[in-house]
Image: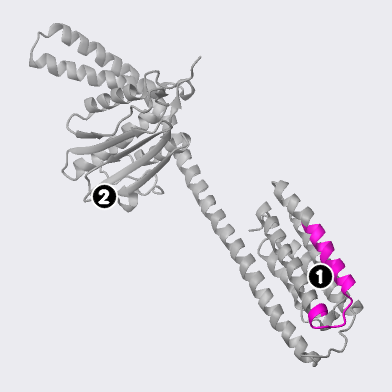
Amino acid sequence: MNDPSPSLLRNLVMLRWLAVGGQAVAIVLAVHLLGIPLRAAPLWGGVAALAAFNLWAGWRARRSAEVGAGEIVAQVAVDIAVLAWVIAWSGGAMNPFAPLFLLPIALLAVALPMPWVLLTAVLCGLGYAASALFGVPLPHVHGAFADPFNLHLAGMAVMFAVSALVVVFFLTRLAQALRERERELARLREQFARNEGILALATHAAAVAHELNTPLATLTLMLEDRLDQTPTGADRGELETMAALVDACRDRVRELAAPADRAGADERPLAAAIEALIERWRLLRPAIELEREGDLADAPAARLAPGVGHLLIALLNNAADASEAAGERRIALHLASDGVALHGSVRDYGDGISEQAAPGALFRSTKPDGLGVGLALSHATVERLGGELSLQAAPGRGTRVSFRLPLQMETVA
């Protein structure tokens, strides 16, 4: 990980409380139950000092947003000092719990850079040497563990169990934190790559929009002249349809060329804005049958946020393309509101989800004439609006894209 975080500090606080409890239990068993003639006052003093220090460390862990490696090692140095004190007053090098000096090294080796780990190893070595040189030897023991060797073996067994539990607990939590961080980094890398591609696409789209504006305006004037010259009949109906399509394309091109920060929410109620959006889409895709479900009556004060329209159009077009590729001419749209968010899904009747359609496969398309940006733009729009989007295989055949978007409520003056 090589990057200490408050979670590491909190884990140390938790382990320190376990150490306080374990040392207290060990003193009670050894001095008061087994009758080993050890000086209890210095031992209880070390436990009390560690508990007092951990109270401050817990307060520090709750308040700190950033933790440096130096602070981590400084706190571990206090643990080493208390451990050396307790070991020295309970047998020194003969204490079966002396190998506990290895635990701080093992714990920090997976969380800190090598120089700090080496410093921790030096501190542990000094603590062990001090407890061995100045430690009080174990006195002769009478009773169940009359043989000092048997007492040492029993202590070694307990020490092994404690070490195993601590290492498994701590390293498992660190490994889980590392996996979560790797997943977050992968998500951020994917989002950065997608946003880079979308930014390049948006820049190019704005330039092309400026270029298309002139020929579309010319086409509009030509169609208006033809309509003035054409009497009522089949030809005029076709010309009116062509004029409506050109007007729709011109409006879309102007939206592409307009700065994004000037785009505000649609002033119409949510239901009316979405109906107008769907009618415009029907005009562009008249061959597709749209199956509607849901009700938006629960959000009378909601407004259509900028970007939602583009999202719906992109999802409807992707679904229509997928259905047409499979020989179908229908898609299904479900929209509903709970007063707080807009819930929707778009279902096609195509061949289903492919590996290239996965969210991570950006700017790739399975369609012969596809640009491969529909899904990427949809994900980017949903993320920007603070919503959620997911893909599932639809029952029977096809794919369902579901989304949830927070509603933009009308402000009352």
Q: Where does the image place residue 61, in percent across and percent down from the top left?
A: 72, 51
Q: Could you tell me how far apart the alpha carbons at marks 2 and 1 are, in whole angstroms?
A: 62 Å
Q: What residue type is labelled 1?
A: Leu
Magenta span covers which residues? 31-54
- The residue at the far front in this view is 33
Q: Residue furthest left?
A: 233
Of the numbered discs in the image, which one, if any, rests on residue 83? Answer: 1
- Which one is in front, 242 or 375? 375
Q: Is residue 306 left or right of residue 371?
A: right
Query: Crowding at label 1, few (<14), some or many (≥20) Cα neighbours within 10 Å?
Result: many
* Relative to 198, residue 80 above or below: below
Q: Which mark is residue 352?
A: 2
Specify which label sits upstream in the sequence, 2 or 1: 1
Q: In this view, does 46 lie to the left or right of 164?
A: right
Residue at position x 14%, y 7% from top? 229
Q: Position of residue 345 (x, y in %)?
A: 32, 39
Magenta stretch: dominant SS? helix
